[in-house]
Image (tube, helix red, strand yellow):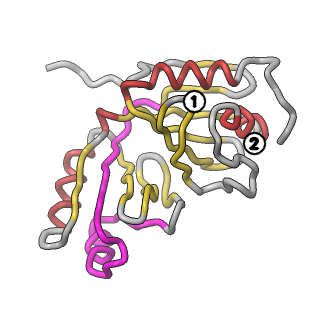
Amino acid sequence: MSEAVSALNGARFSGIVQIEDAGLAGMLTLRADFTDDAVRRALKTVGVDFPDARMVVGAVGNGTLWMSPDEALVLCSYKDAPAKSAEIAAALTGLHHLVVNVSDARALIRLTGSDGALRETLAKLSPADLAPGGLPIGEVRRTRLAQVAAAFWFASTDEAYVICFRSVADYVFGLLSTAAENGSEVGYF
């Protein structure tokens, strides 16, 4: 049996920000009625907190991203994703829900650098408001990076994450690398 590898296989780039493959990550799409107290209680029993609208709770490896009013992305370790998916499904038995392990269909990219450089790099590629007030730390944004769907958030003032489909990971990595070339500073943020 072959070993799992991330879409970017350890790729790194250093410019005004550092861009790197975040490696294999467990990602579970979870759809349910999150206004239902029974759903929230069931999720709590398996350690899943549903975030407020557009927010992230926890961190890469153990967190949840709000994706829409009835969708969340649960983050866990790659090796734990199948068991975590089964655990969530079992906790939600009898309740309308869907849990899908999408770990192998997604890529996770980590960006580090100064807050201004991170925001400028992403702003060159996305129509989202990247001003600190427009996208505060801990808020997730589903949007586009050039021609492809993506989601991103700032984990801190010097760290951001991008999630995209595995099939376009190399394209997204190239876009980010070009937007982060040394000498490409805009100086807006």
Residue named by callout 1: 146
Location of residue 103 in the rendering, given as x and y in whole percent from the top left corner: 31, 38
Please, what is the three-letter code of the amino acid marked with disc 2? Answer: Asp
How busy is the neighbourhood of tag 2: few (under 14 within 10 Å), some, or many (20 plus)?
some
**Residue at the image position 17 percent from the left and 54 percent from the top:** 86
Q: Quadrant of residue 112?
A: top right
Q: Is residue 88 above or below residue 123?
A: below
- Horizontally, residue 24 falls left or right of residue 56, namely left
Tell me where residue 8 appears, x and y as whole percent: 43, 21
Q: Amino acid at mark 1?
A: Ala
Please, which residue is most extreme toward the right here? 187
x and y percentages locating residue 50 in the rendered image: 41, 67
Q: CA distance from mark 2 to mark 1?
A: 21 Å
Q: Which residue is mark 2?
A: 115
Q: Secondary structure at mark 2?
A: helix
Question: Magenta segment, which residues?
Answer: 22-51
The quadrant where residue 133 appears: bottom right
- Looking at the picture, how far across and down is residue 62, in whole percent? 41, 53
